[in-house]
Image (spheres, helix red, strand yellow):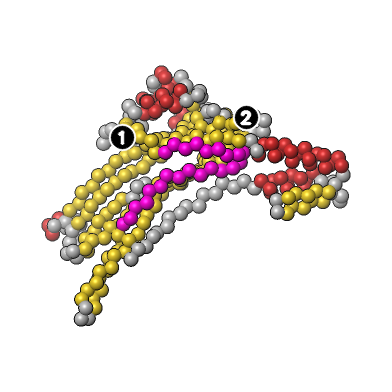
Amino acid sequence: GDNNTSQSTDMSIKSDLYGDVSATVKSMLTPGVGRMNLSAGVLTVTDTSRVLSQIGRYIGDRNRELNRQVVLNVQIYSVESKRSDQMGIDWDAVLSLGSIKSTFTNAFAGTNDPMASGGAMVVDGKGAGTKALVKALSEQGNVSVVTQASSLTTNLSAVPIQVALQQDYVPEITSDQTANVGSSVSVTRSTITTGFNMTVLPYLMPGSSHMQLQFSVNMSDDPTMRTVKEGDSSSVELMKTRLKTFTQRVNMKSGQTLILSGYEQLNTTADHQGVISPRFFGLGGGARGERNRTQLVMLITPVILG
């Protein structure tokens, strides 16, 4: 039979716009005179003409800020180590290049090493620093594009980005004996979903090109497959993966690029076979495997329109 397994992680970025507006308007009402009603997204206020004018200006300002648009350009690269003994990206070597060093500014004040504060730094300029970075990373390992996406959103509206892999495997094989009929074999198939999920929420500062960018990331490694023999003629596949989640927030300007690194994926394939246990090599057991170390580098460039 078939069986689909689901894998989910809840990560919330909350923004209660109606609640914030309602609380502010309520604080502006004249005590004992003003009344307010919020129903089906419609705010009705009764008060003196002076207070109504103040509330009207406040609502107008909020509408203008919330309707501001921003384009979020997201690029995700994977850097696979060229050497088997290489633990990760040598950022000292990458940042020592003149074309790189001159374009980087630290996103966190008081930190000398841009990669020391949670693996984050900001690139100024119109893409020149980004191109130089990718070229420098190619000296560290094999660089490939995981995904590229551009999304148009408004102020305080979250944007989801997903790159997922679905893989089938066989977790169970059962054999039933029936009198006068013989044996029947039932194979259970399941699906595991792994990959990369990101949610980005921009908060544009009023009347400014500055913003606060909040993002939540949910990552899981490609599944490790282990084949285990059951008896003489059947085997099952067992799957294993690592799940990592994190949320960060950074202040930056429109047109700057936020670069995140230090998020590693391990891709491992293994095959174990044997009677009773794969470790019993004397009874024909054996194991073989391959392991690749890949580090993700994420680039997020928000551009405010208008």
The amino acid sitting under disc 2 is Gly
Inspect this view and state whether residue 31 appears.
no
Look at the picture and state if 269 lies above or below 76. Answer: below
Neighbour tally class for label 1: few under 14, some 14-19, many 20 plus, Cα within 10 Å: many
Asked if the residue under mark 2 is in contact with the one under mark 1, i.e. CB atoms within 8 Å, the reply is no
Farthest bottom residue in view: 180
Question: For the residues marked 1 and 2, what is the alpha-carbon distance in whole angstroms?
Answer: 42 Å
Where is residue 56 shown, x and y percent of the image?
A: 78, 40
Where is residue 127 shown, x and y percent of the image?
A: 47, 25
Q: Picture quarter containing residue 291?
A: top left
Q: Which residue is mark 2?
A: 306
The total of numbered circles placed on residues is 2
The amino acid sitting under disc 1 is Ser
Q: Secondary structure at mark 1?
A: strand
Which residue lies at the image location 31% right of the left edge and 34% below the top edge?
81
* Quadrant in which the N terminus appears: bottom left
Name the one closer to the observer, 112 or 173.
173
Which residue lies at the image location 24% right of the left edge and 72% below the top edge?
184
Of mark 1 and mark 2, the one earlier in the sequence is: 1
Point out the stretch of residues depicted in magenta: 147-169
Where is residue 190 shown, x and y percent of the image?
A: 35, 59
Look at the picture and state if 236 lies above or below 295. Answer: below
Farthest left residue in view: 282
Look at the picture and state if 203 lies above or below 234. Answer: above
In the rendered image, residue 234 lying in the magenta stretch gets the answer no
Q: Picture quarter containing residue 180?
A: bottom left
Which residue lies at the image location 53% right of the left edge and 35% below the top edge?
72
In the rendered image, residue 157 lying in the magenta stretch gets the answer yes
Q: Which residue is mark 1?
A: 81
Which residue lies at the image location 74% right of the left edge and 52% below the top edge?
38
Where is residue 189 shown, x and y percent of the image?
A: 32, 61
